[in-house]
Image: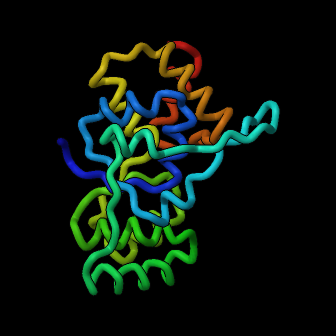
Amino acid sequence: MGPILITDASVLINLVASGMAGKILSGCGMDFKVCPDVIREVKVLRDRETGEEHAIDLEPFFTAGLLERIEPETDLEFELLIDYAALLGAGDGEAMCFALAESRNHPIAIDDERAIRRAKKRNPNFETLGTLEILILWQERNEVADERMGQLLQSIFRFARFRPAVSHPHYGWWQRCWGGG
């Protein structure tokens, strides 16, 4: 087991969309924890080209031990959940992720920059990793070629509609891999 990473729906959907979620989850050296509200938010992938929807089934990842459930247990965690829900005004999954991360001092896997900015105003010590940081970590740890990463990125774009902003610190990596090296 590696360091715990509380995982929001935004990142989890992208990893599933890659078509390689099992390998990525097992090959990052992280212990991915998912709260009930995030599980409820991770429902479908939609094919950008055909419009076809594909249901997401996370149960095989839980069964294989690649994802673990985590939920609020203490009064403090429930109080933090209420605070973050009011602060973020967004999905309950994000609020629960930030509440658990603050209470237990764990990093969060999240791509929602607005939620990150708001949460860091309250707690500037949050450590966050986005989809790209996780993919880069996986690529480096497993010596995955840029061409293969490009295929994953194209799947993520096609099925999860994720593409980093040009201002993202790893946008150059995205472009390099997208083009096959």
Q: Is residue 44 left or right of residue 167?
A: right
Placement of 58 over or under 124, stated as above or below: above
x 50%, y 43%: residue: 168
Q: In the figure, residue 126 lies in which quadrant?
A: bottom left
Q: Is residue 176 left or right of residue 51?
A: left
Q: Is residue 2 left or right of residue 22?
A: left
Q: In front: 80, or 19? A: 19
Placement of 146 over or under 135, stated as above or below: above
Residue 128 seen in this snapshot: yes
- For the view shown, which residue lies furthest in the left direction? 1
x 30%, y 79%: residue: 77
Q: In the figure, residue 70 lies in which quadrant?
A: bottom left
Residue 140 drawn at (x, y percent): 31, 24
Q: In front: 85, or 164? A: 85
Residue 144 drawn at (x, y percent): 38, 17
Residue 129 drawn at (x, y percent): 37, 48
Q: In front: 54, or 130? A: 54
Residue 166 seen in this snapshot: no
Q: In the figure, residue 57 lies in which quadrant?
A: top right
- For the view shown, which residue lies furthest in the right direction? 50
Quadrant, the N terminus: top left
- Number of disc labels: 0
Residue 104 drawn at (x, y percent): 22, 68
x 35%, y 73%: residue: 99
Placement of 106 over or under 143, stated as above or below: below
Colouring style: rainbow
x 51%, y 71%: residue: 92
Q: In front: 38, or 143? A: 38
